[in-house]
Structures are given as C-alpha cells and as structure tokens.
Image (spheres, rainbow, N blue to C red):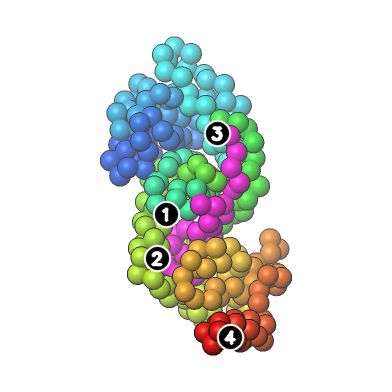
Amino acid sequence: MQNLFQIKQEMCDIGRRIWLRGYCAGNEGNHSVRVAEDRVFCTPTGVSKGFLTPDQITVVDMDGHQIDTHNKMKRTSEVLLHLQIYKARPDIRAVVHSHPPHATAFAMANIPIPEGVHPEAEVFLGKVPLAKYTTPSYKELGESVVALINKDTNTVMLGNHGSVCFDATLLAAYYKLEILDAYCRILLLTRQLGRINQLTRQEMIDLLKVKEQFGLSDRRLSCAAQGCIGADNEPFLATFDIRPQTACACQEDGGVEKDPAAISEEKFEAMVRQLTDQIMAGARG
C-alpha cells in the first residue's frame, strides 16, 4: 500500500507525463486522488503539471475546502468537478482533467467520439459522452458531467474544453487519457485517408464479450444484437463519403431505443434516385 508521500510523488510523475505528451500547455489541467472518505489530494493552481513537486500537492475535504492551510500553494479551482465525480461514483479514487489536443478537437467541433471502430477504444474507453460547454471552475461543470456518467463510464469529453478521465487508480485514469487521444488521432488520420471501416454488429458482440471476460462491464452488450451504435456516430462519419450506419442506442435500463433520425433503406434509395435525377437533368440542361 502506498503511503501519502508516495501518492504525492506519483501525482508529480503523472503530471510530468501529461506535460511531456502535450496534453496540457502552460498551467492547464489538474488531477487528484481520493486518499480517504473526506480527503482528496489535488494539484495546485498556477503550476505546470511538468514541474510539480510533492510539497505543492494540496489537500481538500469533500466540500472543496483546503485543509493544509500551511501550504503556500492553493488548490485548483476545478477540483469541484473531481469532487462531484467522487460523490457520484464511490468506486472512483482518481480523476485526471486535461486538454489532449486530438480529443479536444472533437469537443471544439461538438462532434461526439464515434463508437464501433477501434477495438482498444471499445474495451478500455467504451462509450465516451460529450457534455455541453459549461464555464470552468463553476459547479455546473461537475453537474453536467455527473449527469452523463453511469457505472461503466470512465471518460467524458467537455464541450469546447477538454476531457476528464477517472478510475480506481491514478495510473489507470492516466492510461485512459493516453488511449483517448491516441484513438482521436487515429480517427483524424482516417479522415485524411477519406475512408473508415466500421465494426459489424457481430464483431461488436464478440468484442464486448471479450471486454466482459476482462472484468469490464459494458451495458451495450445487452442490445448489441439489435445494434448498439446510436446517432452520436453520425456527425463524424458524415464527414466521409459514406452513409453513417446508425442502428439504435441503448437506454439507461439496458433496453433498445430506436433512433427516430435513422433513415430507412427505402427512403435512402428514394433520396439517391431524386438526387441522381437532379444531376442528370442539370447535365442535360
């Protein structure tokens, strides 16, 4: 079991990794570790994550009040986001908020990160919700995130802002951050290639079963046979010269919700014929 100093040292080590990978510029970002029921270690405000020292790590209670009043450093104002995640999910012991550039590009464009494309992303991230923009440091930011998470969620994108990853350990939460930005970088590269291959329903079923064998639950398995990829996939896939394969989305109770925006085969074919007729008429003119 780590002692408290070791936890602070690990927070500094993770901060340096975040800085070296370019996930946070300047003094951006913050991370925390819950060390007791009413105690949380968090990074200070105004310090680059690449140059943290253990004595700079601050201590707060679950209401955000700084406990180590002797510390000349002040706790990050965004710890309120962390605390709301801890309160909503007692199993979570570490939170990392960062601005990974490739992932944040999706948040800036208000494009949800697509599902059913990359096996590693499906196993280790699962569905990544996108929260609407809320002013940083306000309690509403935490409320908007908590409203989107369930027992399977470990990563949430913050509209026009960045990401927040959380897990049972700080290292595990940091790994989610690495996987998130790597996946988004791959997605952007596929956009340059001009095509992307989606996983089939059966491939998703098999993949989610493998995930379950790893001890990682995913409620999408309950509706994968009907198609568990919802309309969130459309904004990114629509940037390709393909038809987005929207099927349906899983409800919170594990049931299946038909996507009202999905286009039937008949309607799609009719649209293609109409568009073709218009093009041919223009060519004849």
Q: Which residue is mark 2?
A: 191
N-terminal-most mark, 2 or 4: 2
Q: Nearer the viewer, mark 1 or mark 4?
A: 4
Q: Which residue is mark 4?
A: 281
Q: Is residue 170 above or below residue 211?
A: above
Q: Which residue is mark 1?
A: 180
Which residue range is magenta in the image?
Answer: 109-135
N-terminal-most mark, 2 or 1: 1
N-terminal-most mark, 1 or 4: 1
- Give the alpha-carbon distance from disc 3 to disc 1, as whole Å: 21 Å
Q: Amino acid at mark 3?
A: Pro
Q: Position of residue 200 (x, y in %)?
A: 50, 79
Label 1, secondary structure: give it. helix
Label 4, secondary structure: give it. helix
N-terminal-most mark, 4 or 3: 3
Q: Amino acid at mark 2?
A: Arg
N-terminal-most mark, 3 or 1: 3
**Res 176 visible:** no
215 sits left or right of 135 in the view: left
Any magenta on residue 61? no
